[in-house]
Amino acid sequence: MPTFPILKEGFPYIIYLVIISSIAFFLNIYLSSVFIILLLFVVFFFRNPRRNILKDSNKILSPADGKIMEISKIYESDYLKSDAIKISIFLSIFNVHANKSPIDGIVEYTNYRPGKYLPAFKSHASEINERNTIGIQGDGIKVLVNQITGFIARRIVCWVKQDNKVYQGENYGLIKFGSCTELIVPQNVTILVKPGDNLRGGISIIGVINSEI
């Protein structure tokens, strides 16, 4: 998966803005400054910082940077097919947007659903907005991760397919320009976070697997 400091999906925007900024510089230096600011923001948005992932098969890591909006109990009928816990993470345009695998495992389930583009922090956006889902079978546990678009985000990117191996903390996709990521885990996970917590993808520990439950 991508390890370059800038995610390759940002290159077309960066090249375009470099060209426009160069042309604008010869026409109007003040106009060019607007495009240079946009260029710097795009580079910032598509950044892919290197992180020291402390892998632990008994722990579930955050799949995204952002703030926890909600933690709720649900019945997950598509992949886990059981009672589960859903952790909803809102990513602002200032967060790192690379999504990371919360566990080691095999991608057993994938599903893409087109939809609308409501603000990602809305509670019903998960059920209405464009969404991409992967289900990962790990060592004695299954988890589901939803990538959900927002009002600004209009493009989901996922680099993994069914039967691919993924590693804990590894980048597997991104959502361009603001979004929501949902992590759904079975009830035998002891959740260590709460609404309002700020997370770092691949670093923050969402929960611990309790095999006795």
Image: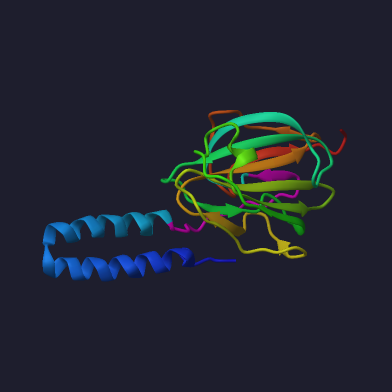
Q: Position of residue 47 (x, y in %)?
A: 43, 58
Q: In this view, does 88 lie to the left or right of 188?
A: left
Number of numbered discs: 0
Q: In this view, does 42 lie above or below 116?
A: below
> Magenta region, mostly helix, strand or loop?
loop
In what quadrant of the picture does the C terminus appear? Answer: top right
- Residue drawn at the location 13% of the way across and 57% of the way down: 30
Residue 123 coordinates in the image, percent (x, y): 58, 31
| Residue drawn where x is 12% and y is 67% of the image | 27
* Quadrant occupied by the N terminus: bottom right
Residue 50 drawn in magenta: yes
Q: What kind of colouring is applied to the model shown?
A: rainbow
| Apparent side of residue 135 relative to residue 40 in the rendered image (left or right) | right
The image quadrant that residue 11 belongs to is bottom left
Side of 69 where 55 appears, left or right: right
Asked if residue 59 is positioned above or below residue 47 in the image, the reply reads: above
Residue at the farthest right position: 212
Q: Residue 16 is drawn in which quadrant?
A: bottom left
Considering only vertical position in the picture, is 178 above or below 158? above
Is residue 196 left or right of 38 when viewed as pictured? right
Counting from the top left corner in percent of width and height, residue 95 is at: 45, 46
User: Which residue does the image show at 81% across and 41% down from the upper left?
Assistant: 77
- Residue 45 versus residue 116: which sits nearer the camera? 116
| Place of residue 108 in the rendered image (x, y in percent of width and height, measured from the top left) | 79, 57
Q: Nearer the viewer, residue 131 or 50?
A: 131
Q: Which of 19 and 63 is in front in this view?
A: 19
Residue placed at 11% from the left, 63% from the top? 28
Per the rendered image, the range of residues in magenta is: 46-61
